Structure formats: structure tokens, C-alpha cells
Amino acid sequence: MTARTATRAGLPIYSGLLLLGIVLFASMGGALRPFDAERVAVGPALAAPDSVHLMGTDELGRDVFNRVLSGTRVSLFVGITAALAAALVGIAVGATAGFLGGFTDDVLMRVTEVFQVIPRFFLAMMLVAFFGPSLGNVVVAIGLLSWPQLARVVRAEFLSLKSRDYIEAARAAGAGNLNLMFAKILPNALGPTMASGTLLVAQAILIEAGLSYLGLGDPSRVSLGLMLQQAQPIMRSAWWATAFPGLAIFATAITINLMGEGLTERWQPHTR
């Protein structure tokens, strides 16, 4: 095994550990700081980073470090829950299409293609604008628009696995379709499914950040996209107010994306 191959093989582990560090940092880091994320005038307005305010303060004197922690928690929550919602729909559609085949497969794949050609971000904007900018609506909008990618992966796995000998043996023993789909085939398709689902988390985080930047996020929650929007007028005089939220979005999304790509290569070695 070459050094490059070893590095690529360890990519899921390295990125997973880094992601764990980000999660722990976002979850526990706030307990180490004396400032509330929404408390104003905890320090001078637009104070540069120092030993007291590690990432400086914004135009209202709020601690940027604590706000980044809170925003990262929101991003992770939206990313994970939206990916889970997309997984429920994607697995149901992909499993049904791949297992039943024929007319059912054709219909479900045409529906999937329709959702794939629609720009997710703009449709998410429309849904959130119509139903209201709450965190729940953001999660539902992203989840309902992100399932086609996962559905295709699950369908491909079901098409490959449903003709295996152990499936035929289970069918001959009297196993029903639901038992075959979710007790026999799906457990063996979880590897590629989880790898694809991990990529959905990163995509959901970026979509949520974009929606919040445009003012369509939950106004009652601190989010990284909202921080970027609020700091836009002062980005030249207070670079830290935009730099640190932007770095948090980048670091979180790229770490999850690298982990997803590593898992994909592990479960699909023929694509290397």
C-alpha cells in the first residue's frame, strides 16, 4: 500500500475525528466562556480579537466566539436532521423502485428526475418564504428537496442485491416483500447509503447558511449565515466579524464532505 493510498484509506477516520472535535467544540465550548451569545455590550463594540474575546466583538459588543459556537450548533442540527429527513424519503423511494422494478421503477425515477432538475436552493427559498422562516421549516424544506441523490444510490444497491442467492433463498422460504427489502437487502446497502447521506449533511449546512444570509433563516436563532449578513456592512473595518463565521462554515462543510468522499471510496473501490 502506497503512502497516498494509505492516506486516502484513512480519510474517513481523520475527517471523522476532526468532525468529532468540531461537534465537541460547538457543544461544550460555550460552557468555558462567561458570555451569552445574544448578550450585547459584553465588551467594546468592534473590539479586535484578544485574550478576553478570542474572536473579537461585533457592532453591538456581542462576543463573536460564543456566537460562532452557537451558529455551528445550529448548522450541525440543521444538517443532520435535514439529511435524516432526506434519508427517510430517499430510502423509501429508492428501495421501492429498485426492488419492484418495471413500471413502478420508471414512475419513481421520473419523479426523482423532476426533483433533480429543480434548483434546490431556489425552491427552498420559495418554501421557506411561503411557510415562514423558522428552523423547522428550513429543515423540512431542505430535507424534502435533498432525497433524489440518495434515492438513486439506494436503487442501484437494491438492483444489485435483489438477485443474490441469499435473497432468492429467503424468498423461497416465504419471506414477504417488506421483509426482503428492509430486513435482508437494506442492511447490506447501508454502507453506500450512509456515505451518500454524509454528503447530504454538508450540502444542507451550506443551503441553511445561504438561506440565513438572505434573511430566510430563523431570526430567533444565532446562525453562521445570519452572522455574515449582519456583519456585511462592517466587514472592512472589522474583518473578524465575517472571517470567523465564514471559516466555521467552511471547516464544518469541508470536513463532513471529506468524510463522505472517503466513505464513498471505501464502499465503492472500483471508482478509485
Image (tube, rainbow, N blue to C red):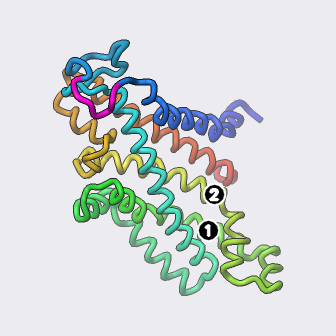
Badge 2 element: helix
Q: What span is colored magenta in the figure?
A: 35-41
Q: CA distance from mark 2 to mark 1?
A: 10 Å
Task: Give x and y (percent) for residue 60.
Answer: 19, 27
User: Magenta: predominant secondary structure element?
Assistant: loop
Tag 2: amino acid: Pro
Quarter in which the N terminus is drawn:
top right
The reply, left or right, for residue 29 in relation to residue 59 is right
* Picture residue at 58% right of the left edge, 85% below the top: 102
| 217 vs 140: above or below | above
Q: Give residue 129's quadrant in the image.
A: bottom left
Pointers 2 and 1 in contact (C-beta within 8 Å): yes
Task: Give x and y (percent) for residue 225.
Answer: 30, 41
The reply, left or right, for residue 195 in relation to residue 243 is right
Q: Give residue 111's quadrant in the image.
A: bottom left
Task: Give x and y (percent) for residue 269.
Answer: 69, 51
Q: Give residue 11's quadrant in the image.
A: top right
Is residue 40 one of those drawn in magenta?
Answer: yes
Mark 2 or mark 1, earlier in chain: 1
Residue hosting label 2: 192
* Picture residue at 42% right of the left edge, 61% below the top: 143
Task: Give x and y (percent) for residue 201.
Answer: 48, 50
| 133 vs 36: above or below | below
* 2 vs 1, front mark: 2
Is residue 234 one of those drawn in magenta?
Answer: no
Residue hosting label 1: 156
The reply, left or right, for residue 260 in relation to residue 34 is right
* Picture residue at 38% right of the left edge, 37% below the top: 70
The crowd level at tag 2 (other Cα within 10 Å; few <14, some 14-19, many 20+) is: many
* Picture residue at 83% right of the left edge, 84% below the top: 173
Tag 1: amino acid: Ala
